[in-house]
Image (cartoon, rainbow, N blue to C red):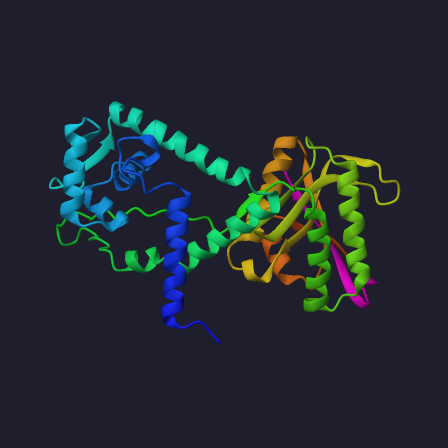
Amino acid sequence: MPATATDRVEAVREFNRFYTHRIGVLHEGLLDTRFSLTESRLLWELAHRDGPTATDLTRALKLDAGYLSRLLAGFTQRGLIRRTRSAEDARQQRLTLSATGRRAFAPLNTRSQAGVAALLAGLTEPQQQQLLQAMATIERLLDNDADDNADAPRGSDGASGQRPQRRPQRRQKAPYLLRPHHAGDMGWVVSRHGALYATEYHWDQRFESLVARIAADFIERFDAQREACWIAERDGTNVGSVFIVQARDDATQAPLPGVAQLRMLLVEPAARGLGLGQRLVAECERFARHAGYRKIVLWTNSLLLAARGIYTKAGYRLVASEAHHSFGHALVGETWELDLS
């Protein structure tokens, strides 16, 4: 029998009781300090914002304006904050932590980090990944900051003679995380290439075999000074990849001096539209320049229109094309180059 609305409410309340107890926020002073949970969060906002006003903090924390005013007055009396008049609106004051405030915040921040580290230390790596993914899911489902800010005042363009209103600051969440490859990632790269190209282009398993050989060569020859792999994560799940490697002669496998090769660009369907493909290609160019390569080459096929669009936008040019029959289809292979000089 499906859970009723009451059952669901009670389940959320039970989780709230469990989690607040588990992270120790029920004590009178948070993390063995003299600050309450609300005061600690207010210190965090002041430490991580560029001179917010009381209005900014009220909107960010969703606190009653009168209650926030009393908290700020207490901070002022204790010498924790400084107030300066806003250049945009003389009626507003910018709030920043004083040296005393920064010293008060430092142990709070350190103890909080240590507490979370201890919490994670009791979990295995897969359990930590599962926890982070679950947390990201909860945050995404319950986050309504975008809706709240949509109704915030945008300010004037100056035509009316009014001062432009400062738009509320909000935490900007990156839609994905780029990281180096870890153990197990090559298996994911091979599996997802095989599955996606079979689904979208009906390529047979010989393509997956090719990707597996490329991945194996990357691991066996890996030189961190000359080669790199980026794995893109979103909510703890892999959603993209790209490799930059030392280019080699197809016949002899001898390195081609000064030439890098971009390989195995992949973006999962769920992550398309985020600019991830362009970001991955840009990371390859940045790395290649830093490593001293003179150019980047890549091989693709003419029907991969999205990838070709990314390469064109990044400044690559098509230098050769050749018909071939691979992966169960008649295809046109293409060689593209980016001159780094």
Residue 315 or residue 141, whichever sits in front: 141
x and y, in percent, of residue 214 in the image: 78, 48
Q: Quadrant of the C terminus?
A: top right
Q: In this view, does 110 lie to the left or right of 191?
A: left
**In the rendered view, would you say 107 is above or below 140?**
above
**In the rendered view, would you say 89 is above or below 111?**
below
Residue 57 or residue 123, whichever sits in front: 123
Which range is magenta?
Answer: 323-341
Give the farthest residue toward the bottom. 1
Instruction: Please tell me which residue is depicted at 44% across the width and 56% down the height of the picture.
Output: 138
Q: Is residue 257 left or right of residue 23?
A: right
- The answer to if 289 sits in the magenta stretch is no
x and y, in percent, of residue 153 in the image: 22, 55
x and y, in percent, of residue 228 in the image: 67, 39
Instruction: Please tell me which residue is depicted at 11% across the width and 41% down the height of the picture.
Output: 91
Residue 84 or residue 305, whichever sits in front: 84
**In the rendered view, would you say 152 is above or below 116?**
below
Marker count (numbered): 0
Q: Quadrant of residue 223?
A: top right
Can residue 322 be seen in this snapshot? Answer: no
